[in-house]
Amino acid sequence: MSKYYIGLSVTYHDSALAIIDDSGEVVFAEATERYLQNKRALNCEPDQLFRLPELLAQYCPGLTQLVIASNWRKKRPLYETLISGLGLLSAQGLLKKGFKKLCSPLQNYQLHHMMACQRSSIDTTGLNLLRIIGEYYPHVTVEFADYDHHLTHAAMACYSSPFEEAACAVIDSWGENGALAFYRYSNRKLELIHATHGMATASLGLYYMKITELCGFDWLKGEEWKVMGLASYGKLNPAFYDVLAATLTIDGFECRHVSENPFEKLAKLDDFKHRQDDPISVAADLAYTGQQFFCDTVSRLLTYLHAVTGSDNLALAGGCALNSSYNGQINTRTPFTQVHIPSAPADDGCAVGAAYLAFHHAQPQPKPAKLLSPYLGSEIEDETIQRLIRYNGALTVQHLPNSICQATAVLLAQGKLVAWVQGRAEFGPRSLGNRSILADARHASMQDHINLNVKFREKFRPFAPSVLHEHAAEYFDNYQESPYMDKTLHIRETQQARVAAVCHVDGTGRLQTVKRDWNPRYYELIEQYYYLTSVPMLLNTSFNVMGKPLIHTLEDALAVFLTTGLDVLVLNDYLITKPYYETTRPPV
């Protein structure tokens, strides 16, 4: 008999599916957006009907018992239930007038839209999965479990960490009743210390979404990343800061919005009014100031958490844990000395968190802590590459099973842009050496070249360094391991010119630590590049174009390869080049 635990993140955005086997191993985890190639997969169920048979056959052999665990409680909060009864969560009711403005940075219709989408997602939890179970596995027994949203965030953070004990903070846009939750983690158990409640509870996630909007970006598309990149081009505006500081009050763990909307005051400031005259400069200053206030506020909360728990280890989750610019400062701005952020700290990671909770409920005996590998997604099989070789008449395909890393390193050192696809896809929003675009880290002009000819995105967007762990302290001040590209650190001034392509305008880099036992092939590639250049890092960015998820299939990879300025595509042991790429590639 084999029992499996399927975790479904049924948040209306960034939904995901995870599978844990009866030994507690995560055998599969992937966000819905990858399969659909639909960024964030808004309002798309995680258990995609036509994909489930393949996943169950591959990752659930001998299936006899199944627990389906989800990341939201079926019982909904009082406010949500009341306004649903009033019809405000229907399409017709979304824009009804005459209701008091909620104490939130966002407008009522924006909040109600999110609530309506979320209720719909919860109502259909597991519907497709049960249809397939009935069809293919009629003798399998099925149980359901639904968990508090922030508890699933905490489970993902803590059970995926190398810690035996830790303090845990979940800092999010919203959960069942609030936006913040704090836990004590020990002996593989989570104890809730404090959770905020009520519609007046402040949300740092909603706050950052509003900053994103005011900077001219779209938070519904997940463009908070742009705020962090743009912030480095701005400066502190004291008038902006004072208005932002008036958005909320903090007392211990309690964080509350003020009774009026201070963002209206921001719009009346002279500096803000001038954004039509100088929109980039004003947006950059707002991004810098907004990021500064975010850092100051989170530091206060985490410092208090340390005082309450006494633990020097921090596990951090929730959408705000994607703020890598702040994550790299935690051990200098708070008493915590060790910080773990999972590869998927936002809602996609809740699929793993829910499955973990179901497993530990059924099998409460503690297991040794270990760092969870992020390489949990789909593979591109050699069989599909063989079809490419058979039917392709334009691309040059070389099979290099014994020298693929050496051959690729030579091309990188020559300045070629390489799409690098290996093994199983990363779980989470960042490419970690299995679905990556890679480039020479040495030349600053590489940044503009990739943004202009490959990513098709704004010039101010930075690139990440993937660095060999043994050499990282030579290049980064206050070096900390960053296995999931989760921390931004300052590059030593003496080294910035050597790695100019991965050095942001403020001298920082959002690094990925690479160890041989974490990713042997990626480690070997960087090592071969190091032998050629004496630089132990590569530029690493996601294998996609702006507005699209990371590639999922061979067809996705070829589409990006053939419609961008990429020079080389490496798929497993196969090196693929375009005709005449030597002469057609734009100069760096």
Image: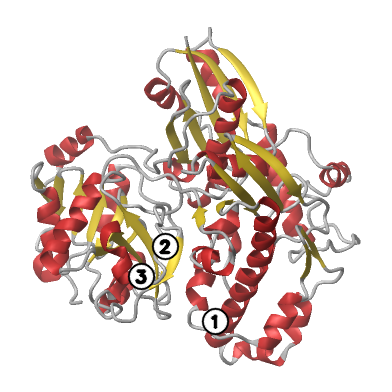
Nearest the viewer among 584 and 187 is 187
141 relative to 55 in the view: left or right = right
Q: Name the residue under label 1.
A: 284
- Which of label 2 and label 1 is nearer to you? 1
Q: Is residue 114 above or below residue 354?
A: below
Q: Position of residue 233 (x, y in %)?
A: 48, 82
Point 26% across, 79% down: residue? 445
Looking at numbered disc 1 in the image, what kind of residue is underneath it? Ala
- Left or right, 1 with respect to 449, comes to right
Q: Earlier in the sequence, mark 1 or mark 3?
A: 1
Q: What residue type is labelled 3?
A: Phe
Residue where numbered disc 2 is placed? 546
Q: In this view, does 541 lie above or below 387?
A: below
Front-lying residue, 212 or 500? 500
Q: Which mark is residue 304?
A: none
Lower sequence index among marks 2 and 3: 3
**The residue tagged with tag 1: helix, strand or loop?**
helix
**Which one is in front in this view, the residue at disc 2 or the one at disc 3?**
3
The residue wearing badge 3 is: 476
Q: Give the Cα distance between marks 2 and 1.
A: 20 Å
Q: In this view, does 565 lie above or below 19?
A: below
